[in-house]
Image: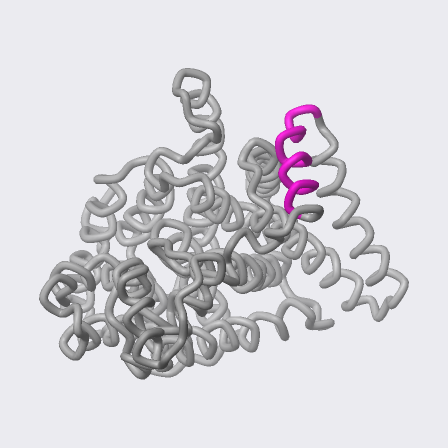
Amino acid sequence: MNFWGIFACSEERTASHFEVLLIAATFVSLPLFEAPKNIFSLLFLLAWVVQSFRCKSVGAHCALNWPIWGLAAVLWVSPLFSTYGDTITPLNSAPRWTLLALFVIAAARLNYSRAQLFIVWAALMFGGAVAVVESFWVWQFNDKPYPEFRSVGHVNHSSMYTLIPLAAGLGALYARERWLQILGVIAIISSLAFLPPSRSLVGGVAITAVIIVALSIVAVRKWSLRGLVLSTVAGLALVSAVLMTPTAEGFRSELVQRVTGDNFFSGRDKILNSALAVWDQHPLLGTGWFSFGTATSEEAVRAALEADGIEYDPNVYWHYEHGHNLWTTMLIERGLVGVTLVTILLFLYFKTFLPIALSRDQLDPMDRGAAVAALLVAIGFAVAGLGNTTMINEHGHAGMAFIAVAYGYLRGRGILPLRSG
């Protein structure tokens, strides 16, 4: 065996085996290990740069990359014009999401073979399933009210992460490869198993949406209105069945309390009020990564309201470290530019993968499955983004990187346009 074959070049700039292994290692590590996920991400970028020089090619054009470039660039510029620039600087705020962005951009410029997609896809689902099992095991011995993924941390972000292997698992059911289907079933079951103890209502709504869309794709392809209705009912029934299990008693209690109480949105509307009170101080570029808590603090909101002659009411304005909504957080941290770019990016995700998922052409099941999985990841981002800040941290890294790999695979198959970058 030729060891150097793992670094072999190709005219189409297909990913080398070494690059694929690093992507797979990153996917396994993301929900489980703090340091390894960063190490593997950096090693992938280094390998991509070296391989690009060797092959004299940075890969192919990806239509999804330009909004990501913009979202990263804003983080380096916005602190320079922010009143909080003395504490929130580009160097102490921007690098983390920039690493995510560069990883995704580089991965999207590579083409992937069927075997390479299999490896990456399997790694993503395997890592997600192991994270759920490990979180349940650790939960037995700590005093926390909810299970949490080791690397992801907070239960809400852990719940957001389960959307990624769930989407990948549903897409994997299209494939003919038996092992991929088995891992898909495991990913689906583990993601659903995490929902009841997490008590995440946002996660429950997003999971329901992802499942309904997955079932609806099959119905729409068959021109079946009846099937579309049945898919919606089936999705609701499946999630309801999970929530009727004994382990979901806490989830049900919280749901009843939320619906019957006077805080249905769990304060998200009040957090939005705080954001709207101060956003016009930095309207275009925002105040920088992870600055939401500082920019919407009680002190900042009080000062803004006082300047406008409005009385501060603690029942109207709440204060948290992030907006509990993708667009609310973007508005403060990356301004209207960030809100526009992230909305365009989600639109491009839907525009790219929905036609392939719904196509009535005789596509290879692996091709359709990859498109469906990528589309469902985007659905999870959008729906969960209404109640939490998605497309950041580990779940953003995993989901956006998988979409990038799916794009590269479908481009290599000739389903998406190929253009030199």
Residue at image location 51% in from the left, 55% down from the top: 267
Q: Colour scheme in the image?
A: one colour
Q: Left of 201 or right of it: where is 214?
A: right
Q: Which residues are magenta?
A: 246-258
Which SS type dominates the magenta stretch?
helix
* Residue 106: % across, % down: 28, 66
Occupied quadrant, residue 306: bottom left
x then y, percent, for residue 244? 74, 32
Q: Nearer the viewer, residue 367 or 187?
A: 187
Q: Is residue 193 left or right of residue 291?
A: right
User: Residue 90, image x and y in percent?
Assistant: 14, 67
Q: Image point 76% across, 36% down: which residue?
A: 241
Q: Nearer the viewer, residue 183 or 304?
A: 304
Question: Residue at (49%, 77%) from the top-left corner?
Answer: 348
In magenta segment, residue 128: no
Q: Is residue 249 magenta?
A: yes
- Is residue 60 shown left or right of residue 8? right
Given the current orientation, which residue lies at the most extreme top position?
A: 141
